[in-house]
Amino acid sequence: MLAGPGSSAQQKEAQSSSVASYDEIPGSICGPEDGPWPRAFTNLTTSEAWDKLSLTSDPQSLAYGTGEEWRADALNFQPFPGAKSQDRYAMQQLHIGGRIWTLTAVFDGHLGDATVQHAAYHVPIIVREFLEDLDKKHGGRVVPPPLVADVFSGAIRAFDDAIANDVLELFPGGLDAAMEMPDQQIHSILNDQSVGGKNFERARLCMYGTTALVALVDPDHTNLWLANLGDCQGVMVSETAPQVWSYEILTRVHNGQNKREVERVKREHPGEAECIVDGRVLGAIAPFRCLGDTPFKQPPEFTRRFLYNLFPGSNDTSLWEEFLVRNKTPPYISAMPEVTHFPLDRLQRPLRRYLILCSDGFTDICGKHQRCVINRWLRTMPVAGDPSSTIPIPPNRALQLLWQGLGGDSVSVSKALTLDLDVPWLDDITVVVQTL
């Protein structure tokens, strides 16, 4: 059994109660307003808790080398049965010029899941295509890391540009031409569900958005690039001596908590006092960098002419108009990823090294204790070839990390899994753990 916080007596008391208060649920999603408290939960045995956590999060693994040396593990977790997760992840090998690159990613969607699903599927494809072109231009020679970073960034921007451009291409002359069309004509072009819905699906992607954190590793495992948009997080942990680990946060959030991001948006929109309201872009959305979210990147008439004409749509556009009237000099949300390069020295490679990618749902349940959670996870992880490593835990490292994030014992995990509440009590959580 995994070691959890608190004494055995405290755990027995919690097990006998089978009720939980809101301050016993990790994260910031549920609170006293979701009462009455305490609420019942199903107290699972350790084996039952592992099984249910695995079933709910559907952990997956990708082996991208021989043995256990190169592997990525991932999961997507939302315990509330009535909510569909808007997180996604990607784990892929990219075959380029006879060599294999590795791409892993976490995407945290908002407003709906159409755009995040589109991103998880197509971003790896367009990154591969851009890298193929780069490889051909260099004749298979090694490409300098700064050039790879530029191409990586360009691929992600191209993906985002296509979301709005695919709609504009339906109207010869673009938005200017659409301004002269009656609503009925625009409506008939976009709402083609009866003949396959291709135009409708294109336009629907513009209504939603997603943050993104994409990791790229070269075939020699000597370079890591991270492309970040939004508030997902990348962490690297390295074992510098047996059971001695270094811990480094590799990303910065792109929201109102980042003063540099606030200054950037204000600098790009001089004289617009309402470009940021209450720490949100145009007073409406928290991330300052995203994929999708076209109403914040195109003139307001794009939304009024195209998105208002999608069926079934909404008769009440007041919430949209609250921020559209502030939209004067788009774009306000950037699709320019913050790309960072990290050399991976193979000659001085640590004993073990892991890259953790996670959506903000995981950082939320960990709070200020995230480093302690990761340290606890590292201590309980079996060491390959160590006969004393007899801890009976599943092999998926992302699942092991989630267990620790939820509390590290069966009672805490049971509360997070089975709370009797009619609204979600945890944010969507996605975790990728990759060996480096």
Image (spheres, helix red, strand yellow):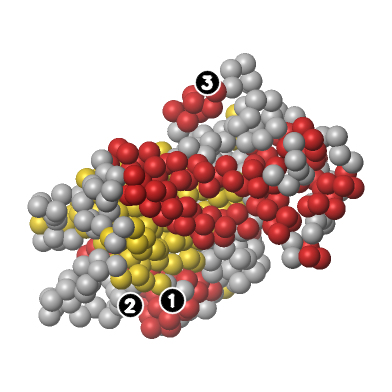
Specify few, some or many for label 3: CA neighbours under 10 Å numbering under 14, 14-19, or 20 or more: few
Query: Which residue does the numbered mark 1 point to in the structure image?
Result: 54
Q: Position of residue 253 (x, y in %)?
A: 44, 40
Whether residue 185 sits left or right of residue 203 in the image: it is right
The mark closer to the camera, 2 or 3, is 3
Specify few, some or many for label 2: CA neighbours under 10 Å numbering under 14, 14-19, or 20 or more: few
Query: Which residue does the numbered mark 2 point to in the structure image?
Result: 394
Viewer-closest of 353 and 422: 353
Viewer-closest of 352 and 392: 352
**347 to 149, vertically: above or below:** below
**264 to 287, vertically: above or below:** above
Which quarter of the image is occupied by the N terminus? bottom left
Q: Earlier in the sequence, mark 2 or mark 3?
A: 3
Residue at horizontal 75 percent and vertical 29 percent from the top: 325
Viewer-closest of 135 and 378: 135
* Element type at mark 1: helix
The mark closer to the camera, 1 or 3, is 3
Q: What separation in Å lies between label 2 and label 1 (alpha carbons)? A: 9 Å
Q: Amino acid at mark 1?
A: Ser
Q: Are marks 1 and 3 in contact (CB under 8 Å)?
A: no
Which quarter of the image is occupied by the C terminus? bottom left
Q: What separation in Å lies between label 1 and label 3 (alpha carbons)? A: 46 Å
Residue at horizontal 65 percent and vertical 69 percent from the top: 82
Query: Which residue does the numbered mark 3 point to in the structure image?
Result: 267
The answer, for residue 340, to whether it is visible in the render is: no
Q: What separation in Å lies between label 2 and label 3 (alpha carbons)? A: 49 Å
The answer, for residue 312, to whether it is visible in the render is: yes
* Element type at mark 2: loop
